Amino acid sequence: MAIHVGDAAPDFTLKTQDEKEWTLSAHKGKNVVLLFYPLDWSPTCEKENCSISKDQKLNAAGSVVVGVSRDSTWSHKAWRNQHALKHDLLADVKLEVAGKYGVVHPAGFICHRATVIVDKHGKVAFVQVQEKTPEARDMAAVETALAKLK
């Protein structure tokens, strides 16, 4: 089931790369950018996450950015350390959260490259899904959507 703008964002708790629990509802009052991506250690995912970490446009005041993929916490930790990423990476090993958000890839073992912005009130404010896995997300559209929420 796909998620749509205006829907209440499904709450969830996942582990970060540091084995800490991260819960969406704990960030109410901030805009949350959920960056779903297929896999650590893949070229497009690496390029995007490194760019997002260096650019910091998405990390404006009142915003939180997290990456979400099916990789394990230990994979996330190694990948984050190798690339000096500044945002947390959440382990959705069983793709349960990807399922709640409707972004599981038809192949069934990864999620789509997708962006969901949850506003300060817990509502979905933006959804973008890349149907072709190798294609990078449209960061200009993501930045524009986030800027409208300030």
Image (cartoon, rainbow, N blue to C red):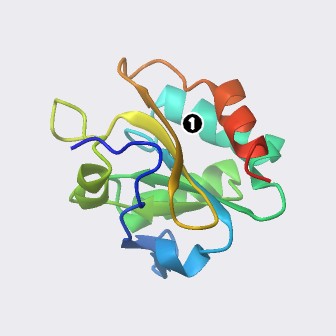
Q: How many marks?
A: 1
Q: Name the residue rendered at 36%, 64% in the picture.
A: 10
Residue under label 1, please give it.
Answer: 46
Q: Name the residue rendered at 62%, 31% in the picture.
A: 47
Q: Nearer the viewer, residue 19 or 74?
A: 19
Answer with left or right where residue 77 lies relative to residue 62.
left
Of all residues, the one furthest to the front in this rendering is 6
For residue 26, what is the image quadrant?
A: bottom right
Position in image of residue 85 (x %, y %):
68, 53
Q: Name the residue rendered at 16%, 30% in the picture.
A: 107
Position in image of residue 59 (x %, y %):
77, 54
Position in image of residue 108 (x %, y %):
15, 38
**Quadrant that contains the N terminus:** top left
Give the residue type that dot 1 points to: Glu
Answer with left or right where residue 147 lies relative to residue 88.
right
When the figure is inspected, residue 56 is found, relative to residue 28, above or below; the finding is: above
| SS at circle 1 | helix
When the figure is inspected, residue 38 is found, relative to residue 80, above or below; the finding is: above
Answer with left or right where residue 69 lies relative to residue 52.
left
Answer with left or right where residue 146 lies relative to residue 12.
right
Q: Nearer the viewer, residue 98 or 40?
A: 98
When the figure is inspected, residue 119 is found, relative to residue 21, above or below; the finding is: above
Q: Name the residue rendered at 24%, 33% in the picture.
A: 105
Badge 1 crowding class, 10 Å Cα cut-off, few under 14, some 14 to 19, many 20 or more, is some
Position in image of residue 143 (x %, y %):
73, 36
